[in-house]
Structures are given as structure tokens and as C-alpha cells.
Image (cartoon, rainbow, N blue to C red):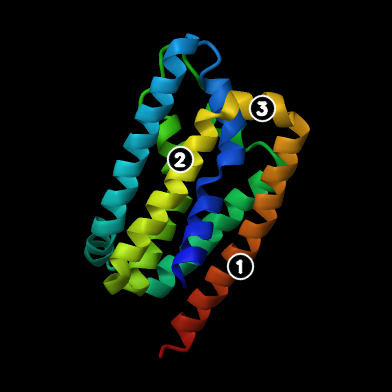
Amino acid sequence: MSLISATVLLFLVLDPFGNLPFFLVVLKDVPEKRKGRIIVREMLIALGILVIFLFGGQYLLTILQVSEPSLSIAGGIILFLIAIRMIFGGYEQAFAGDQREAEPFIVPLAVPAIAGPSAMATIMLLMAREPARWAEWLIALLVAWFITGVMILASYKLHRLLGHQVILALERLMGMLLTTVAVEMFVKGIQRLFLPG
């Protein structure tokens, strides 16, 4: 996988268009001047968690005795489920169903909205396949995270500019792209499981 394709994959997994309405819902009762700070804080926490999984995930897999093909299959299944939610809706409601009035901290914005199971599985899989290219995977993560963060920070302007229907259409398009990536991960995992080498 090239640096560009890894960046695109992580961008799709971080799903800024899907998270945009979710952030709007979670932060709707937060004062306007606090929203930007909260988004930046949660994005930085999410990045920290993803970087930890990028560099520490392989050790976790070793401790749990999880093979790379198994991770690929599991990652494909998780991505597929996320993609189905993106296409048919209900993604943000699944995470926002039990919101309190308190200001959100770590959950549910940093985790699982940004640093969710699919993002963690994807970066662990990239590292497990080619650990020597850790610098490329880190750059891909940083670029995808930065673009996602900028889009979420501009979410209110984007929502007003594009409208709910356009945002929904873009999310579903990203979901369609993500399904193909998920199936590819699943198939490659099966191949490596039964046809090693």
C-alpha cells in the first residue's frame, strides 16, 4: 500500500462527513466559544490514542497472540459494518444515544467517533504488515487526521454551505468506497490464512 492510498484509507475510516452531524448533535448545547476548543482537544486526544495503537499495537497483538491474517479479517468486518452504517444511516445515533448535559470529554468524540475500532484496526494492520514503513504510516495518519480536524472545525460553516442532504450524500459515497476496502481486507486476510506465503 502506498502512502497516498494509506492516507485515503485512513481519511475514509476517520469519516469526517459522517462525524460532522454527530459533532453537531453532541455539541449543540455547548456555548459557541467553547466548541472550537473542545473539538481541538478531542481531536488531539484521538490522535494520541491512534499513535499509541500505531506503535504499540503490534506488541498488543503479540501478547494476545493475534495473527496478521486474523487482524485483516477482523478489520475488514469492522470496516464493513461501519460502511453499512454510513450508507444506510444511524451512525451518529448509535454513539449519541445516551448524551448527558455535561461537556463531552474523551467519550464519545475522541473515542469512538474519531479513534474508533475501525481506525485502530486499520493502523494496527498497516503496521503489522510493514513495520519498517512506520514513518509513512505516521505521515498518512497525521495528514488524514489534520484534514478531518479542519473539516470538523469548519463543520458549522460546511453544514450551512452544503446543506444536510449534500453532507448525507457525501457520507454515503464514502461508505460505498469503504465497503470495497473492507471486502479487499477481508479477502486478503482469508488468502493469507489459507495460502500463507
Instruction: Pick whichever of labels 3 and 1 is earlier in the sequence.
Output: 3
Res 183 label? 1
Which residue corresponds to the image point at 52% horizontal and 21% vertical from the top-left? 26
Which residue corresponds to the image point at 72% horizontal and 38% vertical from the top-left? 168
Identify which amino acid the numbered label 3 is placed on. His
Q: Residue 70 appears at what percent x and percent y?
A: 42, 70
Identify which amino acid the numbered label 1 is placed on. Val
User: Few, some or many C-alpha atoms within 10 Å of disc 1 (few <14, some 14-19, many ≥20)?
Assistant: some
Q: Residue 101 appears at what percent x and percent y?
A: 46, 11
User: Few, some or many C-alpha atoms within 10 Å of disc 2 (few <14, some 14-19, many ≥20)?
Assistant: many
Q: Within the image, what quadrant is residue 17 found in?
A: top right
Q: Is any atom of residue 72 visible in this view?
A: yes
Q: Residue 23 appears at what percent x and percent y?
A: 54, 27
- Report the Cα–Cα distance between label 1 and label 2: 22 Å
Q: What residue does disc 3 label?
A: 159
In front: label 1 or label 2: 2
Q: Is residue 9 above or below residue 142?
A: below
Q: What residue does disc 2 label?
A: 114
Looking at the image, which is closer to me, 160 or 52?
Answer: 160
Instruction: Pick whichever of labels 2 and 3 is earlier in the sequence.
Output: 2
In front: label 2 or label 3: 3
How many dots with numbers? 3
Q: Secondary structure at mark 1?
A: helix
Q: Is residue 87 above or below residue 19?
A: below
Looking at the image, which is closer to me, 131 or 71?
Answer: 131
- Report the Cα–Cα distance between label 2 and label 3: 19 Å
- Report the Cα–Cα distance between label 3 and label 1: 31 Å
Instruction: Pick whichever of labels 1 and 2 is earlier in the sequence.
Output: 2
